[in-house]
Amino acid sequence: MLAVVAAAIVAIALLAVIPRPAAAQSGDVTSGAQVYDANCAVCHGPDGQGRIGVNLSQDFPAIDLTAFVRQAVVAGVPGTRMPAWSAANGGPLADQEIDNVVAFVESLGSGRSPAAPTATAFPVTPVPTAIGAIGDPGRGEALYAENCAVCHGDQGQGRMGATLTTVFAAINPQAYARAAVEQGVPGTMMPAWSDAFGGPLNAAELDDISAYVISLSGHSVAERRSRSLPVAGAVSLPAGCCSWCC
């Protein structure tokens, strides 16, 4: 009897590690590469190796990868920064786009060479510097396009993340925006982007992005400081939803 039980345990263990046959894909890898480049690469890296999001290029032989990835894209992953991308759940992607991006993500860990995402040239245009702002909003615009536009929209109008064009007269807007980018906002999808917190951006880049963000709402830092609460040194953002980050 013990031998039968032991054999059953071994069989179950083997089933858990034996790679399952690849499921028939309903998505197109080439089209999925374009969807991935526009929506996923900012967090997961252009080749799926991870950036502020997890590494997608590793193999997971013991799970139904198609179903697992599709569920994560459709509904998000509770307790993480991964939001729901499906239009049915308030996201921007149609069902076919999800099928395509799932096919591309599967190709990253399948041993095949995936279709490379297509780089999009970003035209850099002069951006007026808000009075009193620290940093270069022109450089910040390019950094914003690389790192922020996928969630907040190309003009700060909001997409997966909140609109950034709201005027906040009662706070120091650049210090607030910089703290949100630097540290993230607990309890929201907004991650920490500072290299001090494991993100990809250095201090000068944080200055540039926050200078650009406040330019979206026409903030003048200097004229607001006289009526703002003093903001000096480190800024701690409370957990929960702020109107800039969720």
Image (cartoon, rainbow, N blue to C red):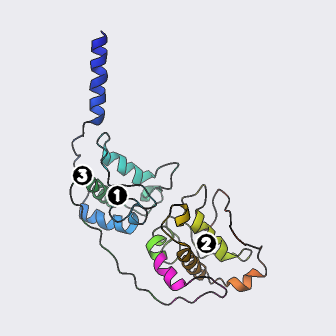
Mark 2 secondary-structure assignment: helix
Image coordinates for residue 34, horizontal then vertical, percent: 31, 68
Label disc, if present, on residue 205 of the rendered structure:
none
**Residue 22 in view of the camera:** yes
* Left or right: where 209 falls relative to 114: right
Judging depth in this view, the residue of 3 and 144 nearest the camera is 3
The residue where tag 3 is placed is 110
Q: CA distance from mark 2 to mark 3?
A: 39 Å
The chief SS type of the magenta part is: loop
Mark 3 secondary-structure assignment: loop
User: What amino acid is found at the position of numbered circle 3 in the picture?
Assistant: Ser
The residue where tag 1 is placed is 98
Find out whether the residues at labels 1 and 3 contact each other: C-beta distance under 8 Å: no
Q: CA distance from mark 1 to mark 2?
A: 33 Å
User: Residue at coordinates 72% horizontally, 77% vertically from top-left?
Assistant: 169
The residue where tag 2 is placed is 178
Residue 77 highlighted magenta (yes or no): no
Mark 3 Cα-neighbour bin, 10 Å: few <14, some 14–19, many ≥20: some
* First in sequence: mark 2 vs mark 3: 3
Image coordinates for residue 96, horizontal then vertical, percent: 31, 59
The segment highlighted magenta reads 126-143
